[in-house]
Amino acid sequence: MERDLSLNLHVLTARLDRAADRLLRAERDVSYSRFLALTLVGELGATTQRVLADYLGVTEPSVSRMTGVLAADGLLDVRPDPGGGNRRQLSLTDEGKQLVASVRQDFEDRLAALVAASGVPYAEYAEYTARLLETFDRMEREAGR
Amino acid sequence: MERDLSLNLHVLTARLDRAADRLLRAERDVSYSRFLALTLVGELGATTQRVLADYLGVTEPSVSRMTGVLAADGLLDVRPDPGGGNRRQLSLTDEGKQLVASVRQDFEDRLAALVAASGVPYAEYAEYTARLLETFDRMEREAGR
DNA sequence: TTTGCTAACTTAGCAAGCTAAGTTAGCGGG
DNA sequence: CCCGCTAACTTAGCTTGCTAAGTTAGCAAA
């Protein structure tokens, strides 16, 4: 039986993630997960843990533990939200900003190189993926997730 | 800044995997990872742990632990390889076969429904993903992974 | 027969995902 | 002012990924 889309998507992304993880650990001593979290805070404006969890597609306990580690490592600044409530304001430290800035484009370039080497049109695949995520997100919200 | 392909691919696949995991745990008391392993043994012919690790895109220790659990749960049969060497012959038990058979098509159907609802052409996206995985696999082998 | 090597597999310990259960901060109504 | 509720967050324990280090089985050469 031929490998289908769900299996291929899983394996491709898992391997890309692990390759990114290995590279980041070797060059910057930070995991890919943590790097993603920093990226979302610094460049996509995730300013509370709840929003960060939503953007990352993980649960709040996962983000809770990660923000603790990132703050301890000096990459993230966590303080009580001036808007009140039991929420925390997240922002990158200078070290965190420098890490994200130096790695970000490199990663997208590598993926773009892979896509080019495959003969797959980058813009088309990126659009399809964004649409799939958008639709999946809507479907889960409608299902009362 | 707009979310790019690497982030979207990661989040989409992570969320699809977790949705699949939740469904399988609720309906069959088995995780998505274990289901994938069983699928690869039963339907794509991964008959040793080394091959299974390669198909799953994980390391041998991960598969080692998983096959132990699957055998203990009565879903997988593990025995010394008649061809000799320190290798093990994997095959599904009747219970394992029944699980894979009952779930397999359902999952692909759900993904196909998502793809259809997004207006993304399934065959095209599946082909692109297969090509990306194939190229990535070749690049990693050439890099001496 | 013994030794060295390779391939396949195992185990320990850590990281990061989850669920379950709990805590904290604020708000609104009585 | 107090109480109940909600939202945001935290912590414990488990699963599954990893790396590092070790063991096992077989093969080939001496």
Image (cartoon, coloured by chain):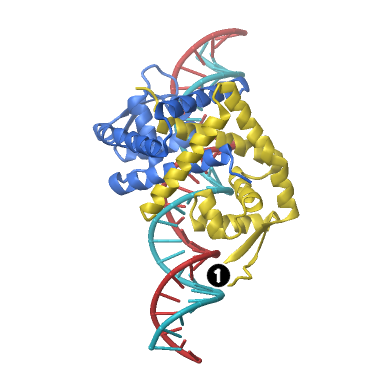
Chain colours: A blue, B yellow, C red, D cyan
Q: Position of residue A54 (x, y in %)?
A: 48, 27
Q: Quadrant of the C terminus of chain B?
A: bottom left
Mark 1 crowdedness (10 Å alpha carbons): few <14, some 14-19, many ≥20: few
Q: Which residue is depicted at the point 41% across and 36% down?
A: A119
Q: Amino acid at mark 1?
A: Asn
Q: List x then y, in percent, for residue A129.
A: 48, 28
Assign a secondary structure to mark 1.
loop
Residue B80, image quadrant: bottom right
Residue placed under numbered mark 1 in the picture: B86
Q: Describe residue B101's horizontal placement relative to residue A8 as left or right.
A: right
Q: Residue B127, how many percent across, how many down?
A: 52, 36
Q: At 53% from the left edge and 54% from the top edge, which residue is drawn? A: B53
Query: Which quadrant would the N terminus of chain B be assigned to in this image?
Result: top left
The residue under the point 51% across, 53% down is B54
Q: Chain of mark 1?
A: B
Q: Is residue B45 visible?
A: yes
Q: Nearer the viewer, residue B47 or B95?
A: B47
In the depicted view, which residue is nearer to us: A98 or B132? B132
